[in-house]
Amino acid sequence: MAVDAQTIEKLAELARIAISEETIDEVSSRLGDVLQLVDQLQAVNTDGVEPMAHPLDEVQVLRQDAVTEPNQREAFLALAPQSEAGLYLVPKVID
């Protein structure tokens, strides 16, 4: 499928990219190749094929959700200019 220069210029404008006059023919050719590939994919009979989220039946291995560092809350609160009941006190920003 051929893509003309006007279509390439319009697509470049919509995508907000600059395509020089010298490269319009190359872009047109490559875009035509992509559209030809899409046509080939659309021609494949997919009746009875179940949709899938990923082509591989892999499972992501997750680590155990366990605490690995000591609780330093009191040490951090001691560094704050003001704190109360385990909370940091900050100046009021919005009236």
Image: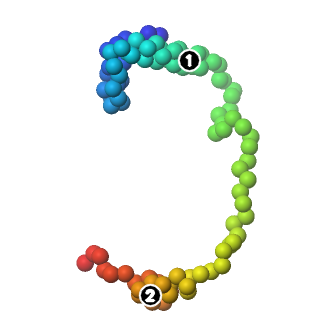
Find the distance from the CA under tag 1 to the CA under tag 2: 63 Å
Q: Quadrant of residue 41?
A: top right
Question: Which residue position is annotated with label 2?
Answer: 83
- x and y percent of residue 89 in the render? 40, 84
Q: Quadrant of residue 57?
A: top right
Q: Quadrant of residue 26?
A: top left
Question: Which residue position is annotated with label 1?
Answer: 37
- x and y percent of residue 12 in the render? 34, 25
Q: Amino acid at mark 1?
A: Leu
Going 35% across and 22% down the picture, which residue do you hit?
19
Name the quarter where the C terminus is drawn: bottom left
Mark 2 or mark 1, which is nearer the start of the sequence?
Answer: 1
Q: Foreground: 47 or 72?
A: 72
Q: Amino acid at mark 2?
A: Ser
Judge whether 40 appears above or below 83 on screen: above
- x and y percent of residue 48 in the render? 69, 27
Return the residue found at the far left.
95
Q: Foreground: 4 or 68?
A: 68
